Image: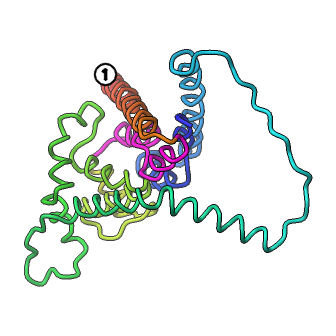
Amino acid sequence: MLIVPLMSCGARFPIYALIIPAFFPAAWQAPILWLIYLLGIALGVLCARILRHTLFRGETTHFVMELPPYRRPTLKGLARHAWDYARHFLHKAGTVVLVFSLVLWALASFPRAPRPAGAAGDRTAAAPELAQSCAGRIGHALESVLRPMGFDWRIGTAMLGAFAAKEIFVAQMGVVFSVGHAHESSEPLRARLRELYTPLNGLCIMLFMLIGLPCMATVAVTRSESGAWKWAALQFGLLTGLAYLITTLVYQLGRLAGF
């Protein structure tokens, strides 16, 4: 359960789809995406072995599951299973996700900066508002911690939104860089990224978002499945710490190598 977030999920793909074409030539794009996925799997195997000899020492318990006979699914059975899973998510994870979503929305929305006359409805005007919000101020405050990984306050602010859901990182970057509504294929956003960052920065963004900062849904489900907040906190802390160490190492070695 602790290593499941290391497997790249669909929510991370918009980040990869934004960053890889922005910084890498076409011939490299598929191999880099493939390597990112393989890196997550390799780290998962390595972390599992480390956990097996530290937190989970002892005799191995064999997993035995009896499979029921296969039958043709019925509409009633499908509806019941769908409802059971939906109810479970809404009951166990939905409450926590809702609370965290409200907190993140408040951090990104307040305090409100005065908007110039005639700027109502202008999406690009949201950038200075975000910079003055609590989320923007937190990003500025964390900049000294983020610098060893090659990140600035803009990336840090977008990462706060990524805690709600990884794909929100792309939209937050669009707000920060005043390009309006952004998505993974946004050429204006890619152009702004190329102006301010290097391929090494782009690689480090993908590494950190792959390894660390599990989203709130992951935290909520880990808590509900394990029955204790300590495992959710341990998962979040260990993976984010590992992401910080690996991303810092890659960035610093890349700088020394002239990248």
Compared to residue 226, the image places residue 119 above or below, namely below
The residue drawn where x is 52% and y is 35% is 2
Q: Is residue 162 left or right of residue 89?
A: left
Q: Residue 113: where, in percent of width, then height?
A: 10, 68
Q: Residue 236: where, in percent of width, then height?
A: 41, 38
Q: Is residue 198 magenta?
A: yes
The residue drawn where x is 38% and y is 42% is 205
Q: Residue 51: where, in percent of width, then height?
A: 54, 22
Which residues lie in the magenta part? 197-226
Q: Is residue 191 left or right of residue 65?
A: left
The residue drawn where x is 30% and y is 53% is 158
Q: Which residue is mark 1?
A: 256
Magenta segment, principal secondary structure?
helix
For the question of whether residue 57 can be seen, the reply is: yes
Compared to residue 180, the image places residue 5 above or below, namely above
Q: Residue 107: where, in percent of width, then height?
A: 22, 59
Could you tell me which secondary element the residue under label 1 belongs to?
helix
The residue drawn where x is 19% and y is 40% is 143
Compared to residue 82, the image places residue 56 above or below, namely above
Q: Is residue 91 left or right of residue 253?
A: right
In-front residue for pair 238/44? 238
